[in-house]
Each structure stands twice: as C-alpha cells, then as structure tokens.
Amino acid sequence: MAPSGLRLAYGPAARLCLACASAVCSCPVLTPSARAAAANAGDDVSAWPAANSGWSVALTRAVLPLRWLFQGVALIPIFAPSLLPGLALIYLFGTQGFFKSWLGGGQIYGFEGIVIAQVFYCLPHAMLILVTALATADARLYEAADALGASKLRIFFTVTLPGAKYGVISAALVVFTLVMTDFGVAKVIGGNFNVLATDVYKQVIGQQNFSMGAVVGMVLLAPAALAFVIDRLVQRKQVALLTARAVPLVPRPKNLPVEIWMPIASGKTIDMMARYGLKGMITLNGEKILDDVVRAYHAACEKHGRPKQLGEDMIWGAGVYLADSKEEAMRRLEPAHDERFKWFAPFGFVRYADEQGRTWGSPGAPAKTPTLKDGVSQKAWFCGPPKEVIEGIKSIEAKYPALDSFMIHWAEGLGPKEFKEQLRWFAKDVMPAFKNR
C-alpha cells in the first residue's frame, strides 16, 4: 500500500516542477528541443516517485535485514557520471543487447530510454533527501494514531505525508533540475530525441553557432534557477519536526501473535482469559488463594478447548526481602508493607485465606488489615537469607510443574535505591538456584 500512497503523495511537489516544465513548453520563442527537454523533465518527475518512494520507505520504516547494503547499492549511481545508466541500458537492451528480445520489437533509444536512465541516475539524489525527511518522524504521533484506530492509509496521509512534505518537494525539485540540465543520458541513449543540453552542444560544437548556443544555455539556466528559488522558499516554511520531547520512530519487528498477559482479578476474568487465550498474572496472593486461582484457570482452559498443565502460561508473583536473618528482613520491610495495606485493605484487596479457606473479608473470615507476619505465613512474602527464600519459592514451584515465571513484587513505600540493592542480591544469590528453568 505504501508505494501507491506515495504516488499520490508527490502531487504538490510534482505540480511545482511540472509548472516549470509547462512554462518552458508554452514559450513561443523556444526551439522544439527546449520543449522536449521540459517534457522529459516533467515525465521524469512523474516516473521518479514510483521507483524511489517505496525504496525510501523500506529503508526507514521496515525492519530490513542488511539495510546498510540496500542503501549502499542505491547510492552507487551517485558516484558515476550520467553517461553510465545510458551505456548500461544500451548493453542490456540496445541493438546488440543481451535482452533485446524483451522489448518485443521496440527499441531503447529515444524518449523512453532517457526516462528509464534518468530514473536510475536521479534515484540516489532523491533517496538521500527522502530518507532524511522520513527519519525525522515522531513515534508518539504514530502511537496516537494506532490507539485511535486509524488505518494505515489514513496514517500515511495524516501523519507521514505532512511530516515529510518538505522533503518530498525538495526531492522533486532536485530531480527536476538534474533532468533538465543533464547531457550524458540524452547524448548516449537519446537517439534523435533532442533536449536542451544536447541542443547547446550541437549549436556550439556542430554548427559553431555560439550566439544560439548562448541563448539556449540561458533558457537551460532559467528552470534550474526557478527550481532553486522555489526550494529556498519551501525551506523557509519548514520548521523543526523533532522537539526535545519527541521520540524517534524506530522500526521494530511484529512478533505475531502477540502474547497478552493479564492480571487475574476474579472468576469472570479467568473465564474470559481462557476463552481468548490470554495468559495470567497473579501476585501477592496467599498460598490457598493462589492454588484456587491456578486450578480455576486450568479448568477454564480445558473448558474452552485450550488444555494446559498446572501453572502453564502463568506468572506468579510474591514479595521478597533479603537479609541475614528472617527477623532482620521483616523488621526492615514492615514499615513499607504496613503502609501499603493501610490503603489496600479497606478496598478488599487482601488475597489471603483463613484456616477454613475463606478469603479475608468474606462472611466469617477475618476483615482486618494484614500484618507482614500474616503475609509471611500465607507465603505471599518471603523474608530472610537467600537459602530460606529459595526454599520458600521452590515449595510453591513444586506444586505446579509448568510454572516457569516468577515476578518480584516491590513493596510500595520501599525506596528505589533499597529495592535495586535487593534486586542485585536476588540476582546474585537466588536466581542461580533456578537457572535450569
């Protein structure tokens, strides 16, 4: 879809260049070769986007393997004279060319050959400008468009094109100027099709008519100068597209289908997750509540034709605090733990069970603010030296053979510096015990 969209996108730039071409074509004092050169430039501006736009979009918006190689290949013509594309086409499709038969009796010499050769010659010049224009996109605009449900085509016309319009105009003007003033391609493959550059050569070298050559040279300079002026006017209107808060757009691969993990909050949540194949997250639940949820998710998956082992496609999370002793760990963690449940408990967010298996807050079960001691006894929190924490985690792991993901819960109120130290300690002394999982 991108190439077809970009064919529409170059319209404003092409109109500027084609306006220059029209002005030259309509001038009554010009020679036929001058009008032919203007027509050739206009057609080359029209043919250029189809060859270049998709390439530039692929280099900036696609996850392209060996991107540097493709960009380097596209830049090769910039180091060669304009004679080279014409000579290459002659060797391939000329009278004695390798692929002459592919033309079905036609020939490469003339207007068509000039257009094809100019596309190859101008591609790297336009590509450099377009790649730069497309690379300055702000990723936040695309995220907002996706969140609002905009289609790819609408995103192109409302986000991509407005952001790159000045680059498109500049690239079109550069192509127009290159084509209007080029001599090599028209001389090698143009045949009897005259353009301004070859006309100057014929007047000065062939006929020694220096005055007419000077006149044609001035005519040749006029559209190039006009294109230069238009480009400068366009650049004045251009503003910075990336601000200090902008997020550069970096293409990333789409790993489909996308894994979706969802916190398990209720029985209705479990059934919905099993129906649509969503994976579950459960954290800071007492041992009895955790077991009920894991088995309910397992049963719901069986019900909806998605059989799983116990613990499969689930992340279990628990609070962890490491210290030299269990008592020391609880003493340090207790203030943050208690502060958390002061505002969690009144809303019923206490996922512990009493001796009869009833959830706290349900009729007959405790309805109080839990202490850290309650959390440790419920195996929602593991406090102490690494060895004891490892034993506690493995006691839960042993019950669910397919459980392979564990999430460390951060006690709200615990300072970031302290929590990072806990993470480093956990990575150093606890994680190696689970390296085979």
Image (tube, rainbow, N blue to C red):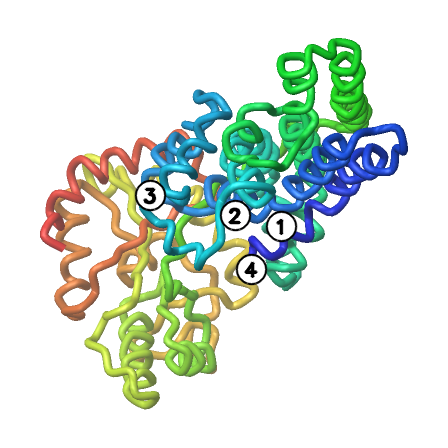
Kindly identify which residue carries mark 4. Answer: 1
Kindly identify which residue carries mark 2. Answer: 54
**On the rendered image, what quadrant is the C terminus found in?**
bottom left
SS under mark 4:
loop
Mark 1–mark 2 Cα distance, whole angstroms, equals 8 Å
Mark 4–mark 3 Cα distance, whole angstroms, equals 21 Å
Res 218 quadrant in image: top right
Mark 4–mark 1 Cα distance, whole angstroms, equals 9 Å
Position of residue 175 measured from the top left corner of the image (x, y, whole percent): 64, 32
Pointer 1 with pointer 2, Cβ within 8 A = yes
Q: Earlier in the sequence, mark 1 or mark 3?
A: 1
Pointer 4 with pointer 1, Cβ within 8 A = no
Instruction: Name the mark nearer the viewer: 1 or 3.
Output: 1
Position of residue 434 measured from the top left corner of the image (x, y, whole percent): 13, 50
Q: Earlier in the sequence, mark 4 or mark 3?
A: 4
Kindly identify which residue carries mark 3. Answer: 65
Kindly identify which residue carries mark 1. Answer: 6
Res 310 quadrant in image: bottom left
Residue appearing at x 51%, y 68% in the figure: 348
SS under mark 2:
helix
Tell whether 114 sits left or right of 325: right
Q: Amino acid at mark 1?
A: Leu
Q: Amino acid at mark 3?
A: Pro
Residue appearing at x 74%, y 16% in the figure: 217
Mark 4–mark 2 Cα distance, whole angstroms, equals 10 Å
Mark 2–mark 3 Cα distance, whole angstroms, equals 16 Å
